[in-house]
């Protein structure tokens, strides 16, 4: 006789017991034989040190193929009880038993999944020209691999529900690429014909186009791996090598689904770079242009994908105030940590505005967040006399009263900077440059929010970036370069 329990066909339901609940045990025996009996021996050890023993008879349910299936109900139990049980069977000629099982009775865990999608504002605010206005490509590249792919992964599992926090600075920058013609310096280097790259541009290309995870983005692709080793050895790069590097740095940042096949995106088109991955090397300028077009196709469909998930009820989209991370400095730059005694910071108040987006979002801000702000921030008033913060009573979906939510009030028109440039002259050079960028920035329009809920958001993860090469580089980038030939 064989007897078993806690397999996919013989589970314990529920698997975790709270106080007052009973558990249904499903048990199987082999072979089918008349005169079988099955029972469960139960030992309960309470938190007070008391111990009790029980024997629970199992009831036959059905025969299927060569097995018999039985069912027994144990419990209820008290909170913190430690339960040890074992199942036993007997025929007319032999006995059998399964290994003992132990569990502790306690409250169930209610798990809420929150994904925090965040990128700081990378735009160089001193540059009016949108071409190359972003010094780093992280918004664009993470949209290709993470922001789209993670949402697509959720869509594959309709029974999974979670909250996704979309930071306004991230949304605004994605739309900056797709609607306002913004690009980053890396994208400009990608688009530039390899034979026209200057010596400095070649150096930048060789220094930055390996900024990817070695084991997951470089080594799996033979051509990219070969270029990586070529760079490490200090060998010269031909024009074709540079062009292949332009392509592979970008290909490695696409999500796996785009590299492996065609993906149907929300606007009804398909996006894929599989043909370039299969080609491997010898890319042309036409190939690079087509690859960049696939990037923009994904960028344009990233936010619509989140909107689809929200409208279907599978995810809830939340947001945080656009300027909250630097709100104390916007309020009063003198609140910055002074690294030298006697250093003076400019005084004044730059404007506050928020980005607009087409999501029905919930503002995430609680007293604990407000308490982290200096009291002076809540007391400041703009020159027009309007308060900085508008506090409204927040009501949860159940109708129960909650806390107050506060956010900066945007002005009716464009808000002029209130930092006199004369005060910038008294600061260090880097500070002056930063302040000039700050006061010249024309902030995006107002973020419209329909409702607010009391919920604290903590970033769930930090993007881990690593340098392109080890600290002990075998050769400088300039030694790897070759002058492009006509």
Image (cartoon, rainbow, N blue to C red):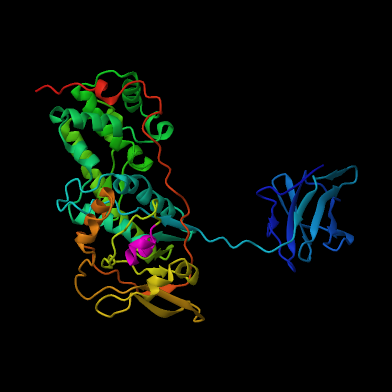
Residue 40's spot in the image, x, y percent? 83, 55
Residue 352's spot in the image, x, y percent? 28, 68
Task: Give the farthest residue toward the front.
Answer: 342
Q: Which residues are magenta?
A: 324-336
Q: Is residue 24 left or right of residue 469?
A: right
Query: Number of callouts in the render?
Result: 0
* Vertical side of 480 occupied by 431: above or below: below
Q: Is residue 238 left or right of residue 165?
A: left
* Vertical side of 471 occupied by 272: above or below: below
Whether residue 308 appears in this view of the structure is: no
Q: Which of the image's four quarters has the N terminus?
A: top right
Q: Is residue 276 left or right of residue 391?
A: left
Q: Find residue 115 and report its image quarter.
A: bottom left
- Nearer to the camera, 90 or 174: 174
Residue ID at (74%, 61%)? 105
Q: Which of the image's four quarters has the C terminus?
A: top left
Q: Is residue 287 magenta?
A: no
Whether residue 235 appears in this view of the structure is: yes
Residue 137's spot in the image, x, y percent? 29, 44
Residue ID at (82%, 50%)? 86
- Nearer to the camera, 258 or 145: 145
Residue ID at (23%, 45%)? 184
- Nearer to the camera, 335 or 25: 335
């Amino acid at each position: 006789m064989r007897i078993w329990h806690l397999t996919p066909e013989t589970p314990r339901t529920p698997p975790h017991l709270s106080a007052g609940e009973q558990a249904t045990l499903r048990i199987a025996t082999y072979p089918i034989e008349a005169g079988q009996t099955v029972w469960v021996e139960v030992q309960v050890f309470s938190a007070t040190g008391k111990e009790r023993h029980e024997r629970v008879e199992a009831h036959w349910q059905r025969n299927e193929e060569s097995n018999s299936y039985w069912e027994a109900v144990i419990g209820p139990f008290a909170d913190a009880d430690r339960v040890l049980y074992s199942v036993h069977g007997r025929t007319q000629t032999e006995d059998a038993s399964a290994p003992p099982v132990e569990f502790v009775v306690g409250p169930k865990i209610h798990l809420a999944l929150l994904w925090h999608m965040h990128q700081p504002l990378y735009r160089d605010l001193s540059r009016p020209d949108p071409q190359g206005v972003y010094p780093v490509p992280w918004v664009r590249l993470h949209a290709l691999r993470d922001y789209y792919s993670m949402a697509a992964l959720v869509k594959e599992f309709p029974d999974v529900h979670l909250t996704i926090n979309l930071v306004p600075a991230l949304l605004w920058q994605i739309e900056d690429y797709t609607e306002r013609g913004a690009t980053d310096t890396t994208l400009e280097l990608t688009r530039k014909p390899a034979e026209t790259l200057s010596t400095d541009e070649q150096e930048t290309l060789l220094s930055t186009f390996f900024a990817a995870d070695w084991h997951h983005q470089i080594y799996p692709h033979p051509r990219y791996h070969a270029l990586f080793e070529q760079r490490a050895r200090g060998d010269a790069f031909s024009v074709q090598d540079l062009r292949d590097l332009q392509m592979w740095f970008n290909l490695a940042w696409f999500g796996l689904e785009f590299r492996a096949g065609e993906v149907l995106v929300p606007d009804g088109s398909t996006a894929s770079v599989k043909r370039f991955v299969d080609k491997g090397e010898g890319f042309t300028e036409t190939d690079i242009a087509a690859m960049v077009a696939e990037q923009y196709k994904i960028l344009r469909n990233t936010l619509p994908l989140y909107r689809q998930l929200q409208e279907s009820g599978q995810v809830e989209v939340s947001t945080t105030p656009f300027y909250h991370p630097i709100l104390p400095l916007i309020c009063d730059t003198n609140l910055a940590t002074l690294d030298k005694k006697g250093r003076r910071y400019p005084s004044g108040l730059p404007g506050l505005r928020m980005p607009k987006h087409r999501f029905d979002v919930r503002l995430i801000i609680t007293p604990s967040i407000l308490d982290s702000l200096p009291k002076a921030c809540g007391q400041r008033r703009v020159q027009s006399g309007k308060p900085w913060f508008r506090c409204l009573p927040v009501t949860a979906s159940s109708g129960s009263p909650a806390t107050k939510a506060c956010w900066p009030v945007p002005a009716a028109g464009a808000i002029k900077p209130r930092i006199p440039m004369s005060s910038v002259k008294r600061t260090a050079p880097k500070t002056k440059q930063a302040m000039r960028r700050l006061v010249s920035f024309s902030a995006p329009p107002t973020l419209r929010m329909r409702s607010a809920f009391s919920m604290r958001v903590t970033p769930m993860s930090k993007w881990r970036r690593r340098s392109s090469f080890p600290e002990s580089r075998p050769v400088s980038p300039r030694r790897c370069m070759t002058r492009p030939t006509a």
